[in-house]
Amino acid sequence: MKKKVELTPEEFTDIELETRHHEAVGVPAIASAVSHLLKEMNPIRASKVMFNLNQKNGVDCPGCAWPDPDDERSTLGEYCENGAKAIAEEATTRVLTPDFFSKYSISELGKLNDFQIGKSGRIGQPMILNPGDTHYSPISWENAFQLIGNKLKSIDPQEAIFYTSGRASNEAAFLYQLFVRLYGTNNLPDCSNMCHESSGVALIETTGIGKGSVTLTDFYESEVILVIGQNPATNHPRMLSALQKAKENGAKIISINPLPEAGLLAFRNPQRMGDLVGKPFKITDIFLQNKINSDMALLQCIQIRLMEEESKNSGKVFDWDFIREHSSGFDEYQKHIQSLSFDELFAHTGLDPALFEEAVELLKNHTKIIACWAMGLTQHKNAVGTIQEVTNLLFTKGAIGKPGAGTCPVRGHSNVQGDRTMGINEKPSTAFLDHLDRGMNMASPRNHGYDVVEAIEAMHQHKAKVFIALGGNFLSATPDTEFTAEALRNTDLTVQISTKLNRSHLVHGKTALILPCLGRTDEDSRGGEKQFLTVENSMGIVHTSTGKLKPVSKNLKSEPEIIAQLAMATLGESDQFPWSKWISHYDRIRELIEKSIPGFENYNQRVRQPAGFYLPNGARNRNFKTASGKTLFTSHTFEPIRIQPNELLMMTIRSHDQFNTTIYGMHDRYRGIYNERRVILMNSNDMKKLGLEDGQSVDLYNHHGGIERKAPHFLVVPYSIPEGSCATYFPEANVLVPISTTADRSNTPTSKSVIITIQPHQA
Ligand SMILES: Nc1nc2c(c(=O)[nH]1)N[C@H]1C(S)=C(S)[C@@H](COP(=O)(O)OP(=O)(O)OC[C@H]3O[C@@H](n4cnc5c(=O)[nH]c(N)nc54)[C@H](O)[C@@H]3O)O[C@H]1N2
Ligand SMILES: Nc1nc2c(c(=O)[nH]1)N[C@H]1C(S)=C(S)[C@@H](COP(=O)(O)OP(=O)(O)OC[C@H]3O[C@@H](n4cnc5c(=O)[nH]c(N)nc54)[C@H](O)[C@@H]3O)O[C@H]1N2
Ligand SMILES: [Mo]
């Protein structure tokens, strides 16, 4: 049978296992970073990027969105192993020339695994795949823009989809949404739809802002920090330094996770010599190893217990001043919680009652509480409700809008939050569009556009004909890989604005284009003047990022320029919309942002301050921008996912050596798994029950909606994970995530609760 290029090859890569780690970072992390950098570039270029990373006036790390400390930054950049890997991946000096594309056909490229595809290098010039072609061939920028402009002009704007990944700068994102809305659609799906959309939906309703409320300083003042469904040692390593400092100031940390993630347990700070030897620093005080998707039940159990304690010690547990002055809906919520059965709910969590009580005790006795969470909460059917149980907990404790307390959804991509602020949103608020229309003197389309899942369905049904991606890897990041591949193949034209090759370049519309762009680390000059771009981190600080490296090819364009050229080819230029003037200096784009988006007053001036500036955040000051001006308590009913005896609930997670679909390496060091990604982590009792052996090769299935989805050839690895739960890596397992199971209200694919069955591998 012909191999499908949309699927990762099923060959094994020679697994090696060791016991899982009980601590993160330390010397092995430094060694790993250096080795990744030196594989991609010479030592001079490597040290240039490392000394610039997350420095004031340096380059913002293209990895995660964790903020940099306002003051003391280490001279070696804000060091982080995975930041170094992200930089190595982008700043590589390997470059793909037309020879590469004439040598490898699409189907040959499909045989490479994602690690090999990524390692091939940076794309060096625009490429086209004409209908029926087997190989990409070069095309001039001019012809590429003309082809896209002509196609867009020939269709209804609702038939075009404009995806964004979360690395685009504020300037690129603003121009992109401006172009798309002037063209006539809100079809602006983005990676957020698969990521923190559930957080945004939950928070805007209960706190009046779709972002978190805390700053880094709050961490240092807090008494209790909850880390729920998040793996910081791998995905936000610099967060560990903040947790360390918080603990040194007396905070206690409760981690809630089906896996005993190494960095949650203990940490050796690479910036402190003393930490590298001797005992590692203990991070977690109470580790609650709950079953997948039991968090709502767990949070409700906590509230039942706190309510009991409050009725015994009136005024000692809850913050009645906050509840009275700053919240609404408490009475109804209280009645709801009192109607629930503790025992029934607790049984779903799989937790040890004594440990649970210790957590309750901590929460009972403290009020400066921060709740952090990431994909372990957002990618479930009940994600929005679960996150609102988090806010319920904070509200009863008055733990928001005061020092040391609040919400902290930890963002993924380095500028995913900024992209949203700039209007990358398929369902923009009326207020946003009103401001934009006033600022730009235009009339935005008002009907909602497609989110990621709706975009896939629209392409599948031939309702959408053009797919344009500003970064990302749509095919591999989205659910139901084979369905999504069919959807993309149904289109007339796919356009990928990319730095590096990925599987989305191999699964395409009738015609496909690759437009290679500058990355974060690349130097960008306009009219002889060096430019910087701006980004917003997870805590709402807007700051600059300046690329300093010589681009690997002269044939790359910056994202703002590519977008402006697309706009000119589609809409033309006028005095009102002078695209070429706007990209002559990025200050011009920031002037447009200042005119159109509240919070960006004196943008060009304020962003030049060394650490940037904070955007307004009502929740931070108890100025809740909800309809009532108060926070909102909400009531939810926990509906457990019912699984049959032969089924397991699977989460798809990240290894230590990847950034989403970009595979930096084949290891998952902290979990003790080396040189293999096709693994399924299982509880040994489940293995016994299903008659499976350590190291056995198996096939994984999902049958949602009566459709068989199969991920062949995975190795069984016994692991510390609750019974009934199991884990695989994203994107290898995305083929199993049904497109038709999404989170209520946020429509986020349920990548952390996939029902699967397992069979011994059949060749
Ligand atoms: N190096 C690196 N950094 C990254 C990324 C990367 O891929 N690599 N990706 C970036 C992006 S876009 C994002 S969104 C973030 C992702 O950051 P994370 O959300 O930390 O990433 P995941 O690997 O998806 O891990 C989710 C964690 O949730 C746990 N979990 C899964 N299901 C449940 C559940 O039902 N309940 C609870 N309590 N926990 C659960 C898993 O065991 C795991 O520890 O990281 C960002 N930073
Ligand atoms: N099963 C499962 N699926 C998931 C998840 C999960 O946990 N489980 N997580 C989801 C989450 S949280 C997210 S955020 C999405 C991520 O979805 P995406 O953001 O679409 O995917 P990435 O893998 O981050 O995109 C990587 C590609 O972006 C391009 N790129 C990198 N840097 C730049 C740049 O500066 N400019 C441009 N133009 N292109 C660039 C490169 O070509 C690279 O191959 O995946 C989601 N999918
Ligand atoms: Mo994400």
Image (spheres, rainbow, N blue to C red):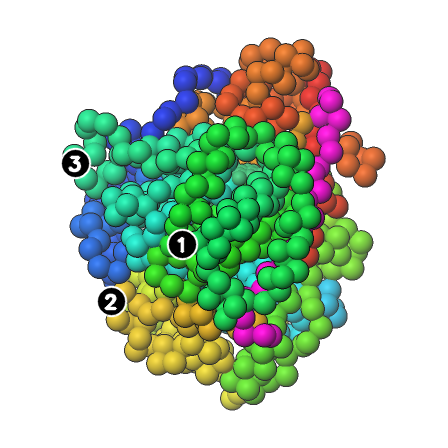
Question: Is disc 1 surrounded by few (<14), some (14 to 19) or many (20+) residues within 10 Å?
Answer: many
Q: Is residue 374 above or below residue 319?
A: above
In this rendering, would 569 be left or right of 624?
Answer: right
Q: Position of residue 591 (x, y in %)?
A: 41, 80
Residue hosting label 1: 367
Decide whether the magenta segment is chiefly helix, strand or loop.
loop
Mark with earlier residue (1, 3): 3
User: What residue is rendered at 44% in x and 36% in y?
Assistant: 358
Disc 3 or disc 2, which is closer to the eye? 3
In this rendering, would 613 be left or right of 176?
Answer: left
Residue hosting label 3: 273
Disc 1 or disc 3, which is closer to the eye? 1
Find the magenta span and give its range.
627-647
Ligand 1 lies under 8 Å from the Cβ of mark 1: no
Distance in Å between CA atoms under marks 3 and 2? 28 Å
Residue hosting label 2: 610
Q: Nearer the viewer, residue 179 or 550?
A: 179
Residue 654 located within the stretch drawn in magenta: no
Mark 3–mark 2 CB contact (< 8 Å): no
Query: Callout 2, which amino acid?
Result: Pro
In this rendering, would 762 be left or right of 718?
Answer: right
Query: Callout 1, which amino acid?
Result: Thr
Mark with earlier residue (3, 2): 3
Residue 639 located within the stretch drawn in magenta: yes
Q: Is residue 484 above or below residue 395?
A: above
Q: Quadrant of residue 752?
A: top right
